[in-house]
Image (spheres, rainbow, N blue to C red):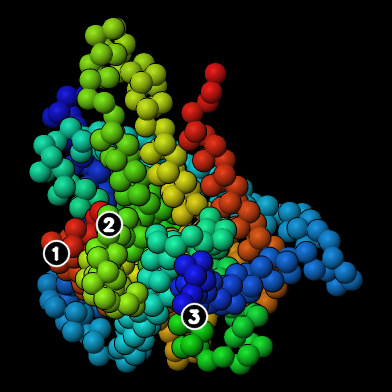
Amino acid sequence: MFTSRTTGLMLVLPAVVFIAVGFLAPVLILLAQSLRLEDGWGIGNYLAFMNDGLGREVFWRTIKLAALVTLAAAVIGYVAAWAIVETRPERRGVLVGMVILPLMISPVARTYAWLVILGRTGFLNVLITNLGLSEEPLRLLFTETAVFIGLLQLFLPLMIISLVSALENLPRDVVPAAQTLGAGWIATFFKVILPLTREGLVIGGTLVFTGSVTAYITPAVLGGSKVLMLETLLYQRVSVANDFASASVIAAILMVTTLAANRLLRRLATPRRR
Amino acid sequence: MSSRMGGLMLALVFLFLIGPFLIIIAAGMSAGETLAFPPQGLSLRWFWAVFEVESFRASFVLSIVLAVGATLLALVLGVPVAYALARYPLPGGEAMRTLLTSPVIVPAIIVGLALLRYVVIPLDLGIVPALFVAHTALLVPYAVRVVSASLANLRSDIEEAAVLLGANRVQAFFLTVLPNIRNGILAAFILGFVTSFNQVPVSLFLTGPGVSTLPIQMLWYMEFTYDPSIAALSALLALMSMAIVLLAERFLGLSRYV
C-alpha cells in the first residue's frame, strides 16, 4: 500500500512531466536563446532590437494600444456592469450570458466582422459616401483606430464580467449612504465604488491588458503590416526575415511584459495599509 | 445614473459586442461576388460554397479532431491533478499548481515557436502530433481549474463511506467521485474544445503547407480573396458556438466555470 503522499505524487506526475517536457523546457530554451550571441552570451540582441527604430516603435505602440484598450474597457465596463447589476436578478443571468457569448465565438470571425464594417466597400464607408460626408471612401482599415476597436470588442466582455461580480459584492447601501452625505456621482465613484471594487477592476484589467499585448489576429487582420504589434512583428521576423535572434527577443519581451503586468496589477489590487 | 440611462448605455454596449455578428451574417448572405455591406442581393449560395472548398473541409476536420483529442488528453492529465490537489498532501503543492497553470500565462505564440524550434525540428515530429502536444499543454490548466472548482463542492465523506463499505480507492473514485463531478468535467470539456477550436497563435508556427487548422486557413484565405465566403463561414462558426454555449448553459450552467 502506498502512503497518501506517494499516491498524490503519482496522480500529478503524468501532467507534470507532460507540461515540463512538452511546454516549459522548450519555452525556457527559447527565452534563454534571446541572450545568445554569435560569440557567447549577453544582451546584445536586446540592444539591437531597441536600437532598431521599428522594434522600438512596435514595442511602444503595443503598450500604448493595450493601455488605451484597458482604460476604455474599464470606463465602459463600469457603466455596463452597473447597469447589469441594477436589473432584476432573473434578467441579470441573461445579460451576463449575452456578455459571455462573444467570448466563445472564434476571434477570427469576430475580427472579420470589423473588416466588413471598416473596409473600403464596408458598411461605414457606404454610409459615409452616401450621406455625402466624403467624396472618397476613407481609409479606416490598417489604422491604429481599427486595431483599437477590434481589441476593445474582443476583450471588453472580460472586464464587464469581472466588474459585475465585484459590483454584486458591493454592499447595497453604500451608494445611497455616500449621496445622503452629500457626495456627487464623481466623488461617490472615486471614493466609494472604486476602492471597494478595486480587485475586480484589477482582475479584468490584467486580462484585457495582457490579452491585448499578446493579441495576434486583430493586429494581423485590422492592422496589417502598417500597424504592427509585437506578435505580428514576431511572426514577420520568423517567417519573412528568418531573423531568429530578434524573434527570441520579442518572445522574451512579450513574456516579461505579461508577467510584469500581472505582478504590478496584483500589487495594485491589495489595498494599501495605512 | 437613472435606470433609463443605464438601459440605453447597456443597449449601446450590446450593439458594439453583438452587432458585428449580425452584419457578418448579412454580408454572408450576399448574392454578389465581392464582400460588401449592405449585401448585393440576398442568397445563401456562399453558405453552401464554403462546404465545397476542399481546404476548409480538411482544416475543419483537423480542427475538430484536434480539439476533441487535445481536450480529452488534457482531462486525462488534469482530472487526477485536480483530485490530488483536493485530497492529498503534496510536497510543494503551490509550486506544482504554478507549474501546471503556467501555460495560461505564457503567450501562446511563444509556445508554438518554442515547440517548432526545439521539439518539432530536432525530433522531426509531424505537424499533427506537434499541434496535439501544443494544444494539450494549453488546455491542462483549464481542465485543472474547472474540475478543481467542481471538486471543491464535494465532501470527502462519501468516498470514505464507500471505502468503509469495502470499495478500494480506485473503485471509490469511479463510483462516488466521478459521477458527482461529471458536470464539471463536461464543462471543462466544452471550454477546452472551444478554446482549442478557436486557438490561433499557438498553431501559427506549427501548421504547414496542406495541413492547417480552420481559423488559420481562414486567415490565409482572407489575405488573398475578397469574396463573402469567409463572412458566411464566420457566421456559421458563430452560430455553432452559440448553439454549444446555449446548450451548455441550459444543462450545465457553464457561466459558473468561466
> Is residue A118 in view?
no
Amino acid bearing label 1: Phe
Amino acid bearing label 2: Arg
| Marked residue chain, label 2 | B
| Marked residue chain, label 1 | B
Tally the numbered discs: 3
Please name the residue that numbered disc 2 is placed on: B155
Determine the CA span between mark 2 and mark 1: 23 Å
Determine the CA span between mark 2 and mark 3: 34 Å
Rendering quarter of residue A163? top left
* Nearer to the camera, B44 or A80: A80
Compared with A81, A152 (above or below) is below
From the image, which quarter does the C terminus of chain B lie in?
bottom left
Numbered label attached to residue B221: none
Image depth: mark 2 or mark 1 in front? 2
From the image, which quarter does the N terminus of chain B lie in?
top left
Same chain, labels 2 and 1: yes
Please name the residue that numbered disc 1 is placed on: B251
* Nearer to the camera, A176 or B217: A176
Q: Residues within 10 Å of mark 3 (few under 14, many from 20)?
A: many
Please name the residue that numbered disc 3 is placed on: B133
Q: Identify the residue shown where x is 44% and y is 62%.
A: B88
